């Protein structure tokens, strides 16, 4: 049974979401003190966080930064504000998905299920390590290591890299990546994938591998395989 932390200060909406999630046999927790979100997060140890942007004390972006400073737990943002910048900011901070209010509960539940399935089921394959461009990609620890150092990737980033490496030197379409990542592209902005890939490439730059992920305009992305000298 998965534990979900719902960080929402609207009590009526919190209770309605909680009731819907309980029907799917999830354990659902809320926040009792919005000035101590991190302390309660640490105590609960949730498998997934659903967080509103507008909260008392500090906004959801602040708490996302705090959570991401020591955890890669999947995060889904909720927002009543109709600003594309909110979605971009969410993805840049490492969120896994974004839901605009008002929303249909079936959409939220589908996104939660897709995220949990992606994060906790994708690494059950026998292959744990992969060598790519003279680097070791660890699909369990979400790390990429080479002679220049080691980086840690988020769940979305390692999943994107894995999909690209599986078809290295071939173009993987944006539609395929979106469908594999979020299950239903109808609810995902095209910019969401761009933000995730750019964040992946920026991290790979730290160990001199960013240049091996290329954008093919109008088509998708490709992971090149470095020639071993």
Image: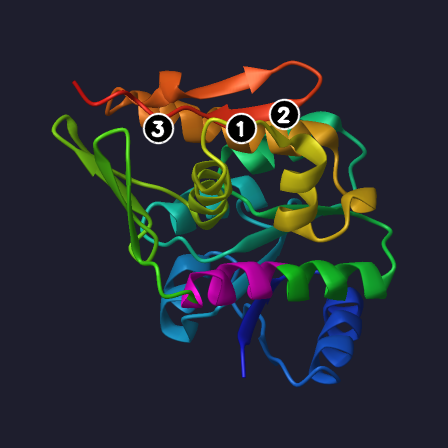
Q: Which residue is mark 3?
A: 203
* Gap in angstroms between the C-alphas marked 3 and 1: 22 Å
One can see residue 125 in this view: yes
Separation of marks 3 and 2 at Cα, in angstroms: 19 Å
Residue 94 or residue 36, whichever sits in front = 94
Structural crowding at the residue carrying mark 2, measured as other residues with C-alpha within 10 Å and reported as few (<14), some (14–19) or many (≥20): some
The quarter holding residue 32 reads: bottom right
| Tag 2 secondary structure | strand
- Quadrant position of residue 192: top right
Indicate the position of residue 213 as horizontal and vertical percent values.
44, 23
Report the residue marked by disc 2: 220
Q: Which residues are magenta?
A: 115-124
**Can residue 116 be found in the magenta stretch?**
yes
Residue at 57% from the left image edge and 47% from the top image edge? 96
| Numbered disc 1: secondary structure | loop
Please give the residue where the numbered disc 1 appears in the rendered image: 170
Which percent across, then down, holds residue 49? 55, 61
Q: Earlier in the sequence, mark 1 or mark 2?
A: 1
Outermost residue toward the left?
Answer: 147
**In this rendering, the label closer to the viewer, 3 or 2:** 2
Q: Quadrant of the C terminus?
A: top left
Label 3's element?
Answer: helix
Residue at (43% x, 31% y) in the render: 200
The numbered mark at residue 148 is none
């Amino acid at each position: 049974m998965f534990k979900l932390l719902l960080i929402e200060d609207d009590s009526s909406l919190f209770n309605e979401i909680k009731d819907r999630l309980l029907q799917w046999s999830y354990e659902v927790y809320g926040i009792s003190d919005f000035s101590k979100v991190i302390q309660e997060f640490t105590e609960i140890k949730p498998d997934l966080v659903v967080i509103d942007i507008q909260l008392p004390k500090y906004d959801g972006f602040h708490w996302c930064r705090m959570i991401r400073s020591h955890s890669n737990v999947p995060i889904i943002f909720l927002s009543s504000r109709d600003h594309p910048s909110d979605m971009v900011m969410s993805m840049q901070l490492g969120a896994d998905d974004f839901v605009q209010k008002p929303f249909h509960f079936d959409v939220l539940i589908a996104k939660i299920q897709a995220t949990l399935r992606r994060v906790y089921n994708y690494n059950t394959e026998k292959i744990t390590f992969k060598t790519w461009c003279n680097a070791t990609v660890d699909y369990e620890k979400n790390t990429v290591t080479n002679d220049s150092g080691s980086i840690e990737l988020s769940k979305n980033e390692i999943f994107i890299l894995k999909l690209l490496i599986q078809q290295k030197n071939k173009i993987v379409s944006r539609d395929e990546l979106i469908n594999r990542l979020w299950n239903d592209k109808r609810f995902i902005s095209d910019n969401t994938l761009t933000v995730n890939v750019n964040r992946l490439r920026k991290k790979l730059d730290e160990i001199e591998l960013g240049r091996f992920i290329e954008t093919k305009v109008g088509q998708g992305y490709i992971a090149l395989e470095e020639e071993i000298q």
